[in-house]
Image: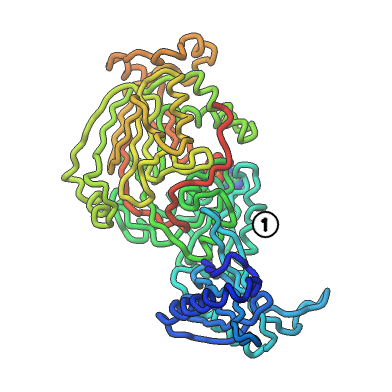
């Protein structure tokens, strides 16, 4: 963070008399910031047009304008300020070079490259310190470079996986254009693999030698993120010998450069779908622990993931997957509209273990994951248009407060949100409200719980997955509940006849037939980024 004592960025532009006492206060303040830490270097640099007294401590660089006495005895001051070194990612020696001159040139001073925060967005900025002395500049360069290199958590070497097929097939371009230059400036080494097919990232995470890396970066959509995170959790369990139902926490942080169509996971840790913000979080080593879930069917692990949906969320994904040939935005709109036109509930038994407290202390989180013998299950049964289990809030440009505004990234629980059987009109209202700033879940047919475990046992899918759109439209009234409750035996028969149900786990279609058990694993994953309350809203879904 850069703190200036004046809104005027150019020092010395303020009227003299009015500024002098304020400037004296500011100088005192700057001294106070620096007093708490030992001064490593002190020197004179020109910032803008004025000379400044510059101090370097372990955590910040601060400057105060030098105020020469005027003939009238009044001091002439500009703004003082400081830059926290935790935001600085590179330092360069500036030189005067003529066109075509590749190296050498007279020293002009230093440029400190730092990350400026604009809402959730991080942008590259530079602070220029001018001093023509080569020796002086070199001394400062070495000291600043050493301080930022020694900062804990900053990666020096990263494994980068790029999915070239994500969304508009722009992932390689996004990386080259926006991320690679920042990594180069910050002297972060990279080993890049462009994935060749589905499952490649998973194989790499299982087999690749990871101890040489400080983190793994994925450039792609939510599917790529999910595959990599699942692979990394599995790898950690192989390395530590932990049981899959009591997984050890992943220590290697994962950076996510968004290049997908929705990018729910990066939006939840960056608040924005922006490759530069993602790259700067990675370079600055800002990490955030994140809860994850494990999904089990018939006693076997299906996968580890962040979000799951059954019902509307699963069906619309299944519908979209059948039309991979369509452009991605069109495909999503088509799938949503088509699934709405054939809206029908799943007959389910939903059991869950509610979190004991709303506290998010690490001790509570630990207890939630290990004291399974004390679990008290609540069971509901009925017709549901959608069931979501989300260990992260699921922020996106369409849902700035998240698909699950009632959970946090690392509160040791997941949000279970069930949408009961209602009319299509009401269901659409509920979908639209997910983009609202508040009251997203305030519907009589929506229930939300904070849970540590969920069991979902589908008793029947009502209606065929292959049912024609026309039939569905004719048989449904938009003002009435979609179907009436069905008898249990009939439901079981239907389920067997029609096979697996489409689950949407982190945007990937996973067909599952039997009861699914979901367990929350507090703070299992480590992602580059930080908790944000709200995502930048840059779009609204035009199809509903
Ligand atoms: N070279 C490749 N060709 C085809 N598929 C790939 C390749 N590399 C990875 N994949 C697979 O592509 C799947 C989808 O990737 P991803 O989620 O990044 O893109 P997307 O589906 O377009 O984005 P979103 O999930 O945001 O809609 C992943 O499951 C991944 O395994």
Q: Residue 185, relative to residue 459: is it above or below?
A: below
- Occupied quadrant, residue 451: top left
Horizontal side, residue 135 vs residue 361: left or right: right
The residue lying furthest to the left in this view is 374
Q: Is mark 1 within 8 Å of ligand 1?
A: no
- Occupied quadrant, residue 402: top left
Identify the element where label 1 is drawn. Answer: helix
The residue lying furthest to the bottom in this view is 135
Q: Can residue 198 be seen in the rendering of this structure?
A: no
Residue 263 rendering spot, x and y as whole percentages: 52, 45
The residue lying furthest to the right in this view is 99
Horizontal side, residue 241 vs residue 280: left or right: left
Q: Can residue 383 be seen in the rendering of this structure?
A: yes
Q: Mark 1: few, some, or many residues within 10 Å (few <14, many ≥20)? A: few
> Which residue does the numbered mark 1 point to in the structure image?
177
Q: Residue 58, relative to residue 183: is it above or below?
A: below
Residue 160 rendering spot, x and y as whole percentages: 56, 59
Q: Residue 173, relative to residue 431: is it above or below?
A: below
* Numbered circles on residues, count: 1
Q: Residue 112, relative to residue 52: is it above or below?
A: above
Q: Residue at x 33, y 61 (%)?
A: 240
Q: Residue at x 38, y 33 (%)?
A: 441
Q: Residue at x 64, y 53 (%)?
A: 174
- 140 vs 166, nearest the viewer: 140
Residue 282 rendering spot, x and y as whole percentages: 51, 62
Q: Where does the C terminus fall, quadrant-wise?
A: top right
Q: Residue at x 49, y 18 (%)?
A: 342
Residue 251 rendering spot, x and y as whole percentages: 39, 62
On the rendering, which quadrant does ligand 1 occupy? top right
């Amino acid at each position: 963070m850069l703190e200036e004592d004046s809104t005027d960025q150019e020092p010395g532009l303020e009227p003299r008399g009015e500024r002098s006492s304020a400037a004296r206060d500011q100088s005192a303040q700057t001294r106070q910031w620096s007093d708490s830490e030992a001064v490593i270097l002190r020197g004179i640099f020109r910032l803008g047009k004025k000379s400044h007294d510059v101090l370097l401590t372990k955590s910040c660089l601060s400057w105060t304008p030098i105020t020469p006495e005027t003939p009238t005895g009044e001091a002439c001051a500009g703004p003082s300020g400081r830059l926290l070194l935790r935001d600085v990612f590179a330092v360069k020696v500036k030189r005067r070079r003529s066109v075509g001159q590749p190296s050498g040139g007279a020293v002009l001073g230093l440029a400190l490259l730092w990350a400026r925060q604009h809402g959730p967005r991080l942008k590259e900025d530079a602070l220029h310190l001018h001093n023509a002395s080569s020796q002086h500049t070199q001394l400062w360069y070495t000291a600043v470079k050493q301080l930022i290199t020694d900062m804990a958590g900053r990666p020096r070497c990263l494994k980068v996986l790029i999915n070239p097929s994500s969304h508009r097939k722009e992932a390689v371009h996004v990386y080259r254009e926006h991320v690679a230059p920042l990594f180069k400036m910050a002297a972060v080494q990279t080993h890049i693999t462009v994935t060749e097919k589905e499952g490649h990232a998973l194989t790499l995470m299982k087999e690749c030698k990871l101890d040489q890396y400080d983190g793994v970066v994925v450039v792609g959509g939510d599917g790529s993120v999910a595959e990599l995170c699942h692979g990394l959790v599995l790898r950690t369990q192989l390395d530590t010998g932990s049981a899959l139902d009591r997984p050890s926490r992943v220590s290697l942080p994962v950076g996510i450069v968004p290049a997908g169509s929705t990018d729910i996971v990066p939006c939840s840790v960056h608040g924005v779908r922006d490759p530069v913000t993602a790259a700067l979080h990675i370079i600055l080593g800002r990490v955030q622990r994140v809860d994850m879930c494990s999904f089990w069917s018939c006693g076997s692990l299906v996968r580890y993931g962040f979000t799951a949906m059954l019902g509307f969320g699963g069906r619309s994904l299944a519908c979209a997957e059948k039309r991979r040939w369509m452009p991605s935005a069109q495909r999503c709109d088509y799938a949503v509209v088509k699934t709405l036109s054939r809206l029908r509930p799943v007959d389910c038994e939903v059991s869950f273990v509610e979190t004991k407290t709303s506290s998010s202390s690490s001790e509570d989180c630990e207890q939630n994951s290990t004291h399974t013998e004390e679990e008290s299950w609540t069971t509901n049964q009925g017709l549901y248009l959608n069931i979501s289990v989300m260990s992260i809030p699921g922020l996106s440009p369409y849902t700035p407060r998240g698909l699950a505004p009632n959970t946090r990234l690392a509160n040791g629980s997941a949000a279970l949100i069930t949408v009961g059987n209602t009319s299509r009109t009401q269901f659409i209202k509920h979908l639209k409200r997910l983009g609202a700033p508040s009251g997203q879940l305030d519907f009589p047919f929506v229930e939300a719980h904070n849970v540590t475990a969920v069991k979902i046992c589908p008793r029947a899918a009502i209606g065929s997955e292959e049912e024609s759109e026309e039939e569905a439209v004719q048989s449904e009234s938009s003002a009435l509940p979609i179907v009436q409750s069905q008898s249990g035996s009939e439901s079981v028969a239907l389920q067997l006849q029609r096979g697996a149900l489409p689950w949407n786990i982190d945007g990937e279609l996973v067909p599952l037939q039997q009861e699914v058990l979901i367990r929350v694993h507090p703070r299992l994953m480590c992602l580059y980024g930080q908790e944000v309350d709200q995502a930048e809203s840059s779009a609204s879904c035009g199809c509903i």
